[in-house]
């Protein structure tokens, strides 16, 4: 049961929070989805790759 709650708080809860923030932002004003897609493609994806590489343990 502890493992399920841990997965819920670590994985599912942040996704729900981000989705709720996006929903509330869309309700308040119009959001340019092309701009968000470009930001995620050109900035966030390489940052995620660099973070994954820096945290991995690779042997030479």
Image: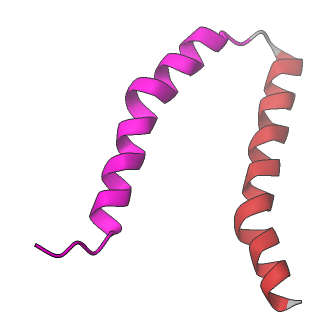
**Residue occupying the far bottom of the picture:** 2
Above or below, 22 relative to 16: above
Above or below, 47 relative to 12: above
**Residue occupying the far left of the picture:** 60
Q: In the drawing, does residue 55 fall left or right of residue 15?
A: left
Q: Answer whether residue 23 is magenta in the image.
A: no
Percent across and percent down for residue 40 are: 50, 29
Q: Residue at x 73, y 56 (%)?
A: 14
Percent across and percent down for residue 31 are: 71, 13
**Part of the protein shown in magenta:** 31-60
Q: Residue at x 37, y 43 (%)?
A: 47
Prevailing SS of the magenta stretch: helix
Among the 4 quarters of the image, the one containing residue 11 = bottom right
Among the 4 quarters of the image, the one containing residue 57 = bottom left
- Which color mode does the image show? secondary structure
Percent across and percent down for residue 60 are: 10, 72
Above or below, 54 relative to 46: below
Q: Residue at x 23, y 72 (%)?
A: 58
Q: Answer whether residue 54 is magenta in the image.
A: yes
Percent across and percent down for residue 9 are: 78, 70
Q: Quadrant of the N terminus?
A: bottom right
Q: In the drawing, does residue 26 fall left or right of residue 33?
A: right
């Amino acid at each position: 049961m502890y493992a399920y709650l841990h997965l819920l708080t670590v994985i599912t809860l942040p996704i729900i929070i981000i989705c709720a923030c996006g929903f509330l932002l869309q309700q308040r004003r119009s959001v340019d989805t092309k701009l968000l897609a470009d930001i995620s493609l050109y900035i966030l994806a390489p940052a995620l790759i660099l973070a994954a590489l820096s945290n991995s343990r690779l042997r030479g």
